[in-house]
């Protein structure tokens, strides 16, 4: 029958570039885990590190909690967001910040840099957003949802990545 847990990934694509906002130094453990996991994947392909943004983190956290409280813990519709966004819904297992980011980075093996394409039925967009060179700031949040022992993790990126027709780096 079904597997014990389920992971769903979602990235958004954008057609325009947004503007920057203020950033402050990393503080909590979770913050450091989100940052380290991103910056490790970025350094593997020669892309500079992201900096933590409290503003983006607050937005991500508010969005995740709104989805939990008002939208039955489904993915947020970020189509009109001015930030890039990666989302992870996980059911049946606890997801640390590092696990969430590593789940996105795991799509790397389906991404073909040479022709900037993704294997069928995969979501390389979550990976390309993680390593998007022109994204400079990161902020993430997570909500624990009652149903199925699940959680929703959201990271925002500024400026947004996944610009249609461009390579991540
Ligand atoms: C903080 O990180 C350390 C190791 O990196 C871990 O052992 C500890 O449980 C973490 N604390 C919290 C509150 O997440
Ligand atoms: C919320 O999601 C759960 C699990 O997917 C489902 O059983 C339930 O019917 C949903 N509730 C609403 C109001 O959509
Ligand atoms: C998301 O929001 C946009 C408008 O911002 C709308 O056009 C689109 O249909 C929405 N998508 C879903 C899946 O609700
Ligand atoms: C990209 O290149 C890979 C490897 O050569 C190939 O399998 C894939 O079909 C190509 N994709 C597109 C969209 O051209």
Image (cartoon, rainbow, N blue to C red):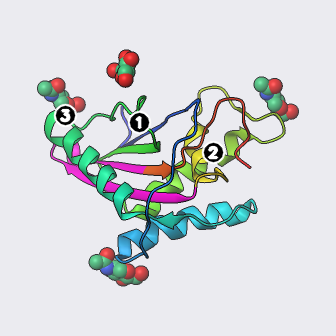
Circle on res. 128: 2
Q: Does the residue labelled 3 lie within 8 Å of ligand 2?
A: yes
Circle on res. 144: none
Residue 93 visible here: no
Circle on res. 72: 3
Q: Distance between the residues labelled 3 and 1?
A: 20 Å
Q: Earlier in the sequence, mark 2 or mark 1?
A: 1
Q: Position of residue 55 (x, y in %)?
A: 35, 58
Pair 3/2: label in front: 2
Q: How far apart are marks 3 and 2 (CA)?
A: 28 Å
Residue drawn at x 43%, y 29% is 79
From the viewer's perspective, is residue 45 above or below residue 64?
below
The stretch of residues the image draws in magenta is 136-155
Q: Residue furthest right?
A: 114
| The stretch drawn in magenta includes residue 154 | yes
SS for dot 1: loop
Q: Position of residue 61 (x, y in %)?
A: 28, 53
Left or right: 104 as drawn, with respect to 97: right
SS for dot 2: helix
Which residue carries the number 1 mark? Answer: 81
Q: Earlier in the sequence, mark 3 or mark 2?
A: 3
Labelled pair 2, 1 in contact (Cβ < 8 Å)? no
Q: Earlier in the sequence, mark 3 or mark 1?
A: 3
């Amino acid at each position: 029958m079904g597997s014990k847990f389920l992971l769903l990934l979602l990235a958004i694509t954008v057609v325009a570039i947004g503007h920057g906002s203020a950033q402050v130094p990393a503080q909590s453990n979770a913050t450091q885990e989100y940052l380290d996991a991103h910056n490790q994947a970025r350094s593997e392909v020669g892309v500079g590190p992201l900096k933590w943004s409290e503003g983006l983190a607050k937005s991500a956290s508010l969005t995740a909690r709104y989805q939990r409280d008002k939208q039955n813990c489904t993915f947020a519709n970020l189509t009109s967001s001015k930030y890039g966004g990666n989302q992870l819904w996980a059911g049946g297992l606890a997801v640390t910040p590092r696990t969430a980011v590593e789940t996105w980075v795991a799509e790397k093996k389906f991404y073909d840099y040479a022709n900037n394409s993704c294997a069928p039925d995969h979501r390389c967009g979550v990976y390309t957003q993680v390593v998007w060179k022109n994204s400079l700031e990161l902020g993430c949040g997570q909500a624990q949802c009652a149903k199925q022992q699940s959680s929703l993790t959201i990271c925002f990126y500024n400026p947004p990545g996944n610009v249609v027709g461009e390579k991540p780096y």
